[in-house]
Amino acid sequence: MYLRVSILNNRKVIALGWEKLDPGWGVAHPFLCRHGRYGTGLSESKTSGIWWARAILTSERPYYIPRKHQLIHYTLNCSSSSPPTCAATPTRIKHEEEEVDIESSAATCPDYFLWIHEDLRPWRSAVSGITRETVESAQAAASFRLVVVGGRAYVEQYRTCYQTRGAFTLWGILQLMNRYPGRLPDLDLMFNCNDRPTIRSYLYQGVNDTVPPPLFRYCSDDESLDIPFPDWSFWGWPEIKIEAWNTLSEKLKEGKKKTKWKEREPYAYWKGNPRVATTRKDLMKCNVSKEQDWNARLYAQNWSSEMRKGFKGSNLADQCIHRYKIYIEGNAWSVSAKYILACDSLTLLVKARYYDFFTRSLVPLQHYWPIKDDDKCQSIKSVVDWGNAHEKEVQEIGKVASDFILENLKMEYVYDYMFHLLNEYAKLLRYKPTKPKDAIELCSEFVACSAAGLEKKYMMDSMVKSSSERRPCAMDHFPQPCSSKLAPETPLALRHANLATKRWAYLSLSVLAQH
């Protein structure tokens, strides 16, 4: 078994462990492991074959010594009982012979994990933290209440979520618990599965400086305190036949290779429902016509028609055939961002108000090109004209964005984000959560066994079938949370700001020079 201690200032790591004597370790080491503590001294080795202690100090990226870990495998037990009930213990199969080497941490968390601290700042800075009364003050705006006690989950439903949003959100949380069994702390939270944020920050400032109700949802904005959480589509959206992200992301990897960038249509592409937002209706005015070509090819999505045709025209993996793709918000943020950014095309992002859990780490002219909301048509035309004359620069931005999505937004990181967010949130609770009187126990059988069709298929496709072979990614390299708001001059923000400013100055001047 091994332990580790990270030294954050210089990124050094002390690894402490016990194992059989290796003849090669007859040398001095800078740290000594005694009784679970560490100090300066020489490592001690005893007779060959006797367990001994050693410690290592490395000045490079943290090196983690593996320990043995027993995988837990899960199976879905859908019996004839209706409604499905949760077993006294989760359905799991232990393979005694299947032990794997687990790493203390296999990776460093992507930069967007930094926002976890900022999103929880209002409650970290509150003297009272989060009390039971504070949590329950969010009930009026919540769709459901989720409570985890002793590794078991309970849900109290208040309002019906649109389509299967609620079911797939709860399913995702259950898969997180399967991935890291016993690692999720006791917690108590309220969740809203509608589109727009509702906890307005100005209501909790100045003379009204009270602790705001903590409310989880899929997006937020600069005027709100709602806590962003990964949306349901990561586990599937059966109503419009969008597969779970672990499946679809692999298809997008292959789909973007089908048409080489130089062979792609040299226009900006968008397909969606324009009726949900005024800004989308305005975008449709930029479509090609007999009088004007704004370099945009826009298609109104008719979901009723698509449903009748079996969604044959809506395969996202087949839509990487244009050099440019447009992202524009709908009623609020749109789940389409990850599908658009994954194509290697240059994403033209119409000025957005809302953000989800990862989009705040997207940098203009590094991951996308900003489009003016009040001058969409001319803005799109100018960028496309410039891009077709500067293919190398356009391809570079498209590839960086695609790599960001397909590498930093893997499902393992989505689960790790959920894990760290819920753990940091639980640290702020000032009471011991208990099962609400009207709550029902939640388990994979309860959610999936009563599902049918694509809903059940996507749940089966996204089911975590065994515990993880590694621990969650490490957040050690981020600034430690404090009560004050993250300053814009934090190293991460400053690095991105400098990069964006330089690229914006160069590329924007190049575009203007042509018009």
Image: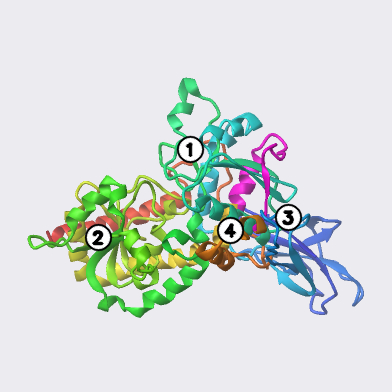
Give the alpha-carbon distance from disc 4 to disc 1, as whole Å. Answer: 22 Å
Return the disc, 1 or 2, that comes first in the chain's sequence: 1
Amino acid type of the residue that numbered disc 4 sits on in the rendered structure: Tyr
Indicate the secondary structure of the residue bearing disc 1. loop
Return the disc, 2 or 4, that comes first in the chain's sequence: 4
Amino acid type of the residue that numbered disc 2 sits on in the rendered structure: Leu
Number of other residues with Cα within 10 Å of mark 1, as a class: few under 14, some 14 to 19, many 20 or more: many
Mark number displayed over residue 225: 1
Q: Nearer the viewer, mark 2 or mark 3?
A: 3
- Mark 3, residue position: 182
Residue 190, given in percent of the width and then of the height, sits at: 57, 40
Residue 209, given in percent of the width and then of the height, sits at: 51, 24
Return the disc, 2 or 3, that comes first in the chain's sequence: 3
- Mark 4, residue position: 415
Give the alpha-carbon distance from disc 1 to disc 3, as whole Å. Answer: 29 Å
Number of other residues with Cα within 10 Å of mark 4, as a class: few under 14, some 14 to 19, many 20 or more: many
Number of other residues with Cα within 10 Å of mark 3, as a class: few under 14, some 14 to 19, many 20 or more: few
Report the residue at 82% width, 60% height from top. Answer: 33
Report the residue at 44% width, 64% height from top. Answer: 242
Return the disc, 4 or 1, that comes first in the chain's sequence: 1
List the single residue furthest toward the left. 291
Q: State which region is magenta.
A: 419-444
Left-right relation of 466 to 250: right
